[in-house]
């Protein structure tokens, strides 16, 4: 186990990065020098001015503290939306692949159609119409991004249902639903987990994009919103947008590394010849 | 081939129909009651309500309402913007050329640059160039496009002061002819550059892995055994086969660009549909938003099908 992790550099850095992110999120109040919601008297301070490591914004909030606390929002969005998308994909794809026949044909066609629809804009539309609380954002990202997970799970279920142990279970008289939940999904879940990790990166980028269009939740601190706020001060206070963006790049890279690493380890067949 | 074509066209048509259904559902489920808006806040006369519902067909069952919506939308009537009081279709048609200019330019450029980088990296696998390109593509892949745009503004406009950051033309000068074209190109550099940088990783990954894959095929080994020069093997066999998957990616990338460009247009105040999206969001102009979503869905479906068909013509092995 440990040897596999150390041998795969992407997985190693991904896991180390994830531990780092989790520590930052958990210890946010300890690490952050100031309350990120505190509107101080130091308005638009430069880097290091008055002890503000990364400066302040127009409301006098400390940028460094905001970035530390923003980790919580990003991780929350990533985990919850990816979880919803993973569960939906697993169930829909599992049913399609295992049941086969007409059910499979209908669901596959539905997946193909869904994959052709512009997801980001659909999310944008729903958030604009139904309100921009962060929970809406998470749920909507979750229920619009399941098709790629479903596709993977379907392929797994298609091959698993031909295996001897599944046939044995059928012969033993176990019901189809029992087999689906006891054998098909647990054995086919690994590619979905890897893909879900990549989905977390996309969820973070989507949330940031929504915030940048002014559809973020105004009651929380998120990196996307910091960039949105910083846009107006690009020439006079470049630090507001810049460092929040760097935080996004680092976090998203960590999840990509983790996803690619998991992919190598869980699908040893694909590791060869796969670029990047 | 015919069967495949037919199947793809059917999927495409279904996609468009589903896009209409989603649109219709969103309009209907969205909070707010149009009759209430029409009647005004104070009055609540049941007779007036019934009359208005009758007039707009809102008392009919949902599926009948859907078909009448479909009929109007098919005629190109996407409703009236509640802010500008103009047909949404006209507003979109006005802004579309500027968006298409951005999308196509950056789509083609990223195809060429990304694929070239992927091929070079695959040919020199494991060398410094490969590691450099791969790292570069990894980081670019993790970047929010709009943030990259802002950073390019800081570098090229605030610090170096060599490129314009706002709009499509210089508002203070009224150029004509060649000078106008040059002015537009100058304004395009930053937005197109941002989009190209964001799109490069997609082509890079596919080009690199497909060149590596083709290089490991048995027939390449056979060609090597015959003593054919590496250069000839690459130009005649590897390149042609490895380039094919990028065609599919071109379709996906264009589809992504059609929606992703909104963010970039917002950053650079490019007068395209993205700006329309932003103002529609800020002013809660829902008919416009919904109309844009519909146009996007339909154009993406069309692009994807065209790309699939082109791919099937180029590569006779591909059938689903």
Image: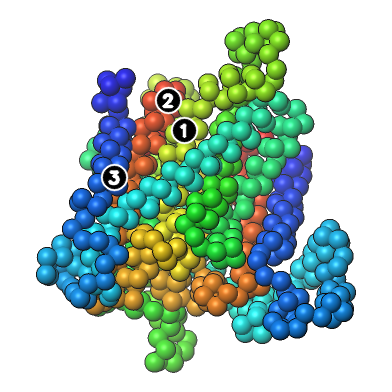
Point out residue A136 in the picture as x, y percentages from the top left corner.
Answer: 53, 56
Quadrant into which the N terminus of chain B falls: top right
Looking at the rendered structure, the secondary structure element under dot 1 is: helix
Disc 2 marks which residue? A266
- Judged by depth in the image, the label closer to the viewer, 1 or 3, is 3
Mark 2, secondary structure of its residue:
helix
Q: Check if mark 2 and mark 3 are on a common chain.
A: yes
Identify residue for label 1: A193
Nearer mark to the viewer, of 1 and 2 = 1
Give percent across and percent down for residue B206. 45, 42
Q: Are marks 1 and 2 in contact (CB under 8 Å)?
A: yes
CA neighbours of label 2 inside 10 A, class few (<14), some (14 to 19), many (20+): some
User: Does any portion of residue A117 appear in the rendered image?
Assistant: yes
Lateral position of residue B227 relative to residue A52, left or right: right
Question: Above or below — where is B228 with respect to A171?
Answer: below
Residue neighbourhood size for the residue with mark 1, other residues' Cα within 10 Å, grouped as few (<14), some (14–19), many (≥20): many
CA separation in Å, label 1 and label 2: 9 Å
Q: Are marks 2 and 3 in contact (CB under 8 Å)?
A: no
Pointer 3: what residue? A26
Q: Are labels 1 and 2 on one chain?
A: yes
Residue at 12%, 70% (x, y): give it: A49
Image quadrant occupied by the C terminus of chain B: top right
């Amino acid at each position: 186990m440990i040897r596999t992790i150390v041998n795969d550099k992407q997985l190693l850095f991904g896991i180390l990065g994830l531990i780092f992110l989790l520590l930052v999120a958990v210890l946010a109040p300890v690490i952050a020098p100031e309350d990120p919601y505190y509107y101080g008297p130091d308005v638009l301070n430069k880097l290091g001015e008055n002890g503000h490591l990364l400066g302040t914004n127009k409301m006098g909030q400390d940028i460094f503290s905001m970035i530390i606390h923003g980790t919580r929002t990003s991780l929350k969005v990533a985990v919850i939306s990816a979880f919803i998308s993973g569960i939906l994909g697993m169930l829909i794809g599992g049913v399609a692949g295992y049941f086969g026949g007409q059910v499979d044909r209908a669901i596959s066609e539905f997946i193909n159609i869904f994959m052709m629809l512009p997801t980001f804009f659909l999310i944008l539309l729903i958030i604009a119409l139904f309100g921009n609380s962060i929970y809406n954002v998470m749920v909507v990202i979750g229920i619009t991004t399941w098709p790629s997970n479903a596709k993977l799970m379907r392929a797994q279920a298609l091959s698993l249902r031909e295996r001897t142990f599944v046939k044995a279970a059928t012969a033993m008289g176990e019901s189809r639903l029992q087999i689906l939940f006891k054998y098909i999904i647990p054995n086919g879940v690994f590619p979905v987990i890897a893909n879900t990790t990549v989905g977390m990166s996309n969820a973070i980028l989507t949330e940031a994009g929504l915030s940048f269009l002014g559809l973020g939740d105004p009651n929380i601190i998120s990196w996307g919103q910091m960039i949105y706020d910083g846009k107006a001060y690009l020439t006079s206070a470049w630090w507001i947008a810049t460092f929040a963006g760097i935080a996004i790049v680092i976090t998203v890279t960590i999840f990509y590394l983790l996803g690619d690493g998991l992919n190598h380890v869980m699908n040893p067949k694909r590791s060869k010849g796969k670029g990047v | 081939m015919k069967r495949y074509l037919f199947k793809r066209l059917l999927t495409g048509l279904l996609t468009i129909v589903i896009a209409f259904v989603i649109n219709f559902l969103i309009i209907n489920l969205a909070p707010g009651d149009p009759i209430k808006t029409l009647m005004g806040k104070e009055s609540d006369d049941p007779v007036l309500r019934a009359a208005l519902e009758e007039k707009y067909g809102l008392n009919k069952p949902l599926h009948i309402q859907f078909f009448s919506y479909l009929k109007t939308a098919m005629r190109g009537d996407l409703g009236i913007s509640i802010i500008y009081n103009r047909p949404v279709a006209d507003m979109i048609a006005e802004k579309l050329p500027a968006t298409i200019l951005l999308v196509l330019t950056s789509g083609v450029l990223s195809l060429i640059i990304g694929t070239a980088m992927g091929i070079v990296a695959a040919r020199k696998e494991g060398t410094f160039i490969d590691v450099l390109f791969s790292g570069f593509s990894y980081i670019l892949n993790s970047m929010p496009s709009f943030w990259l745009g802002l950073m390019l503004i800081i570098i090229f406009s605030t610090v170096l002061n060599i490129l314009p950051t706002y709009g499509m033309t210089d508002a203070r000068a009224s150029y004509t002819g060649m000078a106008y074209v040059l002015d537009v190109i100058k304004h395009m550099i930053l937005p197109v550059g941002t989009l190209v940088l964001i799109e490069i990783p997609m082509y890079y990954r596919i080009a690199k892995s497909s060149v590596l894959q083709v290089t490991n095929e048995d027939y390449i080994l056979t060609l090597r055994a015959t003593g054919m020069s590496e250069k000839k093997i690459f130009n005649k066999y590897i390149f042609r086969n490895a380039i094919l998957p990028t065609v599919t990616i071109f379709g996906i990338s264009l589809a992504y660009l059609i929606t992703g460009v909104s963010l970039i247009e917002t950053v650079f105040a490019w007068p395209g549909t993205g700006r329309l999206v932003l103002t529609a969001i800020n002013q809660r102009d829902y008919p416009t938003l919904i109309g844009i979503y519909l146009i996007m869905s339909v154009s993406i479906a069309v692009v994807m099908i065209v790309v699939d068909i082109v791919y099937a013509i180029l590569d006779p092995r591909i059938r689903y």
